[in-house]
């Protein structure tokens, strides 16, 4: 049984960050369907975003689901959903260390969010049995896999999309 | 407490579809953080994909999380994650009614998958308090919301991505 708990990490907040009380119970539940293997053992070693690396990562799907891959070998890019299991879930305003300003959780791609599900678009290199080689992930080695989907340019690609705050942001404080 | 259960829907399988035994327990859990309001009351009324409609849909965020929207008003497009709570979760091979052939679950965008999380890219029209008006969703009215993220063209857009089986598919049997 998985129980919701209120935060006990208030002392870890950066200046201006705001945590809320988490709901008393969960509403739905997830299966880990595999693991993602990457060259990065610690969060601080990971690339800042998936386009910063050409590393080939390996997705190992639980054998239970392997027939679900049929047809995926014909796609060029895969939408990879994974679970950022080390992230706290109660922050609504955050100051990620590489940005100078506080932002709302939903304006950021930070792992810290009520449901820490990451969405990454990865280039598919090869499928062998239950193992997929892909380029374009930036997560820690051993990250739990939640889903794989074909990437459709017709519905998933918006080349001229803009993130105003990011375009206008001051230089990073590193 | 949410318990996993084995499928008892074997009789609902279409020809050639394959169901697996679901794992005995879940690994992680989700909060519904809001609801999505759309013009479509039944699954069969929904558009087949998000680019087929110009309907403005309304995402109502639970007030608990509203500060998390700060900064999101500057984005043109939002990645919307939602939970397809009516879908069975145990199929690995499926024959969606608008395609002629069996495919693996991970080669499809079908709601039927081990973790029925949908990923849609929606154009942001307006934010008022805890309500977001967006264009580009295709889900049933009342669908539970899981997450909102800014869409970054630099990492999320792949205009030349290809789905081989889809490009080569025979005409739909409707």
Image: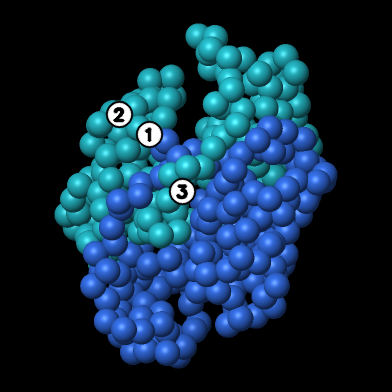
Chain colours: A cyan, B blue
Labelled pair 2, 1 in contact (Cβ < 8 Å): yes
Q: Secondary structure at mark 2?
A: loop
Q: Nearer the viewer, mark 1 or mark 3?
A: 3
In the rendered image, residue A22, in percent from the top left (x then y), is placed at 75, 41
| Residue under label 1 | A50
CA neighbours of label 1 inside 10 A, class few (<14), some (14 to 19), many (20+): many
Q: Residue at x 61, y 28 (%)?
A: A165
- In which quarter of the view is residue B38 placed? bottom right
> Between residues A170 and A5, which one lies in front from this camera angle?
A170
CA neighbours of label 2 inside 10 A, class few (<14), some (14 to 19), many (20+): some
Would residue A133 be found to the left or right of residue A16 on screen?
A: left
Q: Is residue B34 above or below residue A122?
A: below
| Residue under label 3 | A158
Distance between mark 1 and mark 3 Cα atoms: 17 Å
Labelled pair 1, 3 in contact (Cβ < 8 Å): no
Q: Which mark is residue A53?
A: 2
**Chain of the residue where label 2 is placed in the rendered structure:** A
Q: Is residue B12 above or below residue B74?
A: below
Q: Residue at x 64, y 49 (%)?
A: B124
Q: Which mark is residue A139?
A: none
Distance between mark 2 and mark 1 Cα atoms: 6 Å
**Chain of the residue where label 3 is placed in the rendered structure:** A
Q: Secondary structure at mark 3?
A: loop
**Same subunit: marks 1 and 3:** yes
Q: Earlier in the sequence, mark 2 or mark 3?
A: 2
> Between residues B38 and A129, which one lies in front from this camera angle?
B38
In the rendered image, residue B44, in percent from the top left (x then y), is placed at 58, 82
Q: Residue at x 45, y 63 (%)?
A: B114
């Amino acid at each position: 049984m998985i129980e919701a708990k209120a935060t006990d990490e208030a002392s870890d907040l950066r200046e201006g960050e705001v945590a809320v009380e988490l709901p008393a119970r969960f509403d739905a539940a997830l299966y880990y369907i595999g693991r993602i293997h990457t060259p990065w053992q610690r969060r601080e070693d990971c690339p800042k975003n998936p386009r910063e690396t050409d590393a080939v990562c390996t997705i190992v799907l639980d054998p239970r689901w392997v027939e679900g891959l049929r047809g995926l070998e014909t796609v060029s890019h895969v939408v990879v959903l994974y679970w950022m299991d080390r992230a706290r879930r109660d922050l609504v305003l955050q100051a990620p260390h590489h940005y100078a300003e506080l932002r709302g959780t939903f304006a950021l791609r930070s792992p810290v969010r009520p449901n820490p599900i990451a969405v990454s678009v990865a280039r598919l290199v090869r499928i062998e049995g239950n193992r997929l080689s892909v380029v374009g992930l930036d997560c820690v080695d051993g990250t739990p896999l939640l889903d794989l989907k074909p990437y459709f340019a017709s519905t998933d690609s918006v080349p001229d999309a803009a993130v105003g705050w990011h375009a206008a942001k001051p230089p990073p404080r590193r």
